[in-house]
Image (tube, helix red, strand yellow):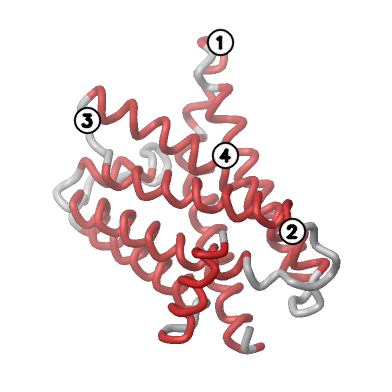
Amino acid sequence: MTKVDSVIEKLNNIIPGSLFGLFSIISGILGDIISRIMYPGYNFMRMAVSDLCLGPGGLFFKLGNIFSGIFALVFVNYLGRTFTEGNINPKLRKTAIICADISCIGFIFLGIFCGSNLIIAYIHGISAITSMGFGFCYITFYNIFMIKDSKYSNSLGYFGFSVSFIFGLLITLFLLHILPVLRFIMVVLPLIEWVNTIALIIWYLIIPFYMIHKKI
């Protein structure tokens, strides 16, 4: 972790680490918007977010995901290393950062492996579960750290728990819909997935702006 800390510190001297959170959101939103515009038949209520990669603008969706994940990887590493107050357990903080890294890498793979091919779709599904599962873990950990660290407002942590809840709900419904008797859950999954996406976007906007404002 020491070498990673050194790299993050040097990078932060060039570009503030908080900005990478904004870069991540801008990349992801641009990819979604462009691919959505080029996919006139897309239905938010019935189609998953990743279905955008199957449309004419699928390449933009994939690139948006990939760059969003790369920028997010830098941001979550920087953010995790700012939690130095409030008697935060170093091992727990390290675990949270590892969870964040795995989640972001899974998100990058979502962009790389996205398509109708059976094998690609299978890898995409595994990447989705990985990204969501570890995303729930690291955001929950970070929320706790924000509440304990005096550099951050408690309200940031409390809001973050709502994001964690949506993550948990999406993961639970996704796993339950695999059961034949609960396949009807599939009807609401696209909407919950979009709600989760919007909640994550807001989280990735609020935290960097707060860090910039407080010069963290």
- Is label 4 in a helix, a strand or a loop? helix
Image location (x, y in percent) of residue 77: 54, 64
Q: Nearer the viewer, residue 84 or 127?
A: 84
Give the residue drawn at x 50%, y 64%.
4
- Residue 81 in the figure: left or right of residue 61: right
- Residue 186, relative to residue 5: is it above or below? above
Q: Residue 153: where, in percent of width, then height?
A: 77, 76
Q: Name the residue located 49 percent from the left edge and 37 percent from the top edge.
A: 130
Question: Is tag 1's residue or tag 3's residue first in the polypeptide sequence?
Answer: 3
What separation in Å lies between label 3 and label 2 (alpha carbons)? 43 Å
Q: Quadrant of residue 119?
A: top left
> Label 1 crowding class (10 Å Cα cut-off): few <14, some 14-19, many 20+?
few
Which comes before the other along the chain, label 1 or label 2? 2
| Residue picked out by circle 2 | 90
* The one of 192 and 135 positioned closer to us in this rendering: 135
Quarter the N terminus occupies: bottom right
Relative to residue 87, is residue 215 depicted above or below?
A: below
Q: Name the residue beneath numbered marker 4.
A: 133
Dot 4 surroundings within 10 Å: few (below 14), some, or many (20 or more)?
many
Judge from the rendering whether residue 89 lies leftward or rightward of residue 189; answer left or right: right
Q: CA distance from mark 4 to mark 2?
A: 22 Å
Residue 181 image label: 1
Residue kind at label 2, given as amino acid type: Pro
Q: Amino acid at mark 3?
A: Ser
